[in-house]
Image (cartoon, rainbow, N blue to C red):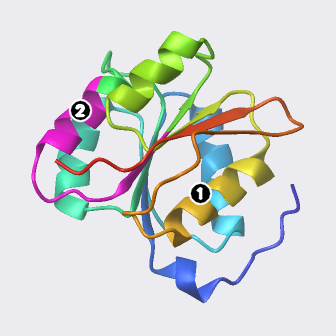
Amino acid sequence: MKHEINSNPSMEKKKVLIVEKEKEIRELLRVTLECGGIKNLIILSRGHAAVRTALREKPDLILTGVDLSDGANGLDLIRKIRLRKGFNGIVLILSANTQKRDIEKGLAAGADAYLTKPFSPQKLLDTILCLLKKPQATTKSPQISNQWGEIIHEQPNLSF
């Protein structure tokens, strides 16, 4: 990935909550999003704090892992946030769990998209920029794959 800062005025105001247990991955995600022009980042490793933060800060996108550092589960995090009024953002799961049943569980929990590890930072950025530009009420394609081996699964955003 090029480490050029992409000045994207439409993305500068977007708020993204990153919830990831691995410090190195959190840093990679921060650098990747900043290079894409997304500067308003909230970065956490703990799932329990993420629920409160998401409801208070109302990010445009939550990027979460499945296994979080405080023993919390990213799927439970998504369910808790989706059940509460006031959060209408996008949720993207980034996980090493690549089995079909894991992906189905993530989407059933309320994720809008599921990206498997390992991932290309450029593909992750492209996916996030695409998700943030789409109107939330649109229907998304059921599956997209690319040459890096990642699989991106998407579903329509189901508002509760």
> Split into 4 quadrants, where in the image is the N terminus?
bottom right
Badge number at residue 72: none
Q: Which residues are magenta?
A: 76-92
79 in relation to 51, above or below? above
Badge number at residue 79: 2
Can residue 68 be seen here? The reply is no
Residue 70, position in %: x, y?
32, 21
Residue 62, position in %: x, y?
41, 49
Residue 38, position in %: x, y?
57, 70
Residue 54 horizontal side relative to residue 119, left or right = left
Q: Are marks 1 and 2 in contact (CB under 8 Å)?
A: no
Instruction: Tell me what residue is drawn at x 40 percent, y 19 percent.
Output: 105
Q: Nearer the viewer, residue 106 or 156?
A: 156
Q: Which residue is mark 1?
A: 128
Instruction: Tell me what residue is drawn at x 65 percent, y 83 percent.
Output: 8
Label 2 packing within 10 angstroms: few (<14), some (14-19), many (20+): some
Residue 50, position in %: x, y?
28, 42
Task: Give the mark nearer the N terminus: 1 vs 2.
Answer: 2
